[in-house]
Image (cartoon, grey):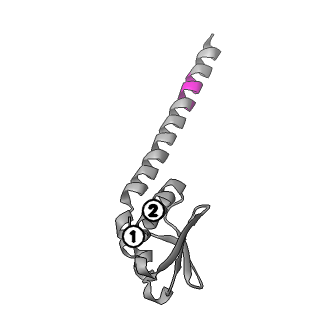
Amino acid sequence: MDDYLIYIALGILVIIVIAVSYSLINNKKKANSESIDIQGIVSLIDRNNVVNVEYIRNKIIIHFKDLNLFNIEEFHKSGIKGINVIGDKIKFYVDDDNEINKEIFEAIKTFIEGK
């Protein structure tokens, strides 16, 4: 009888640890998404200098007419991670959470299209 109580107590303890871990992970993701200034990122882009914007896997790709007119340093300071410059385009992501990256992509695309 005592053995069953030990197993039940251990099971409850494992469930509590999993629930607390899950809660902490979700709160961290939420805090990251709230700390990203999407409009600040978008404001660094000159829509007249953009040819195209794409979203491939977890990366946002912006094709520029003239990359020299774009301030990559300011872009990086805004919280952008993993910036790769390839010719007249940049590839980047903002967070490991694809939903945040998609949200930023949609904001940039809407801005570029002038909506």
**Residue 7 figure quarter:** top right
Image position of 46 (left or right of 88): left
Residue 82 among magenta residues: no
Is residue 28 or residue 79 the one in the foreground? 79
* Span colored in magenta: 9-14
Q: How many labels does the image show?
A: 2
Q: Can residue 80 be seen in this view?
A: yes
Residue 43 percent across, percent down from the top left: 35, 73
Residue drawn at (63%, 10%) of the image: 1
In the picture provided, is 43 more to the left or to the right than 5?
A: left
The amino acid at mark 1 is Val
Give the Cα distance between marks 1 and 2: 8 Å
User: In this figure, which residue is indicated by the disc labeled 2?
Assistant: 104
Q: In the figure, residue 10 lies in which quadrant? A: top right
Residue bearing mark 1: 42
Q: In the rendered view, would you say 67 is above or below 98? A: below
Residue nearest the viewer, comparing 65 with 37 = 65
Q: Where is residue 4 in the image (x, y as percent from the top left)?
A: 63, 15
Looking at this view, is 10 or 40 the one in front?
Answer: 40
Residue plotted at (41% across, 76% down): 47
Instruction: Give the image location of residue 92, x and y in percent.
Output: 54, 71
Residue 45 versus residue 35 in the image, above or below: below
Residue 60, can we see it? no
Q: Name the kind of residue labelled 2 in the image.
A: Ile
Q: Which of marks 1 and 2 is nearer the N terminus?
A: 1
Residue farthest toward the top in the current orientation of the protein: 1
The secondary structure that dominates the magenta segment is helix
**Residue at x 39%, y 62% (from the top left corner):** 36
Q: Are marks 1 and 2 in contact (CB under 8 Å)?
A: yes
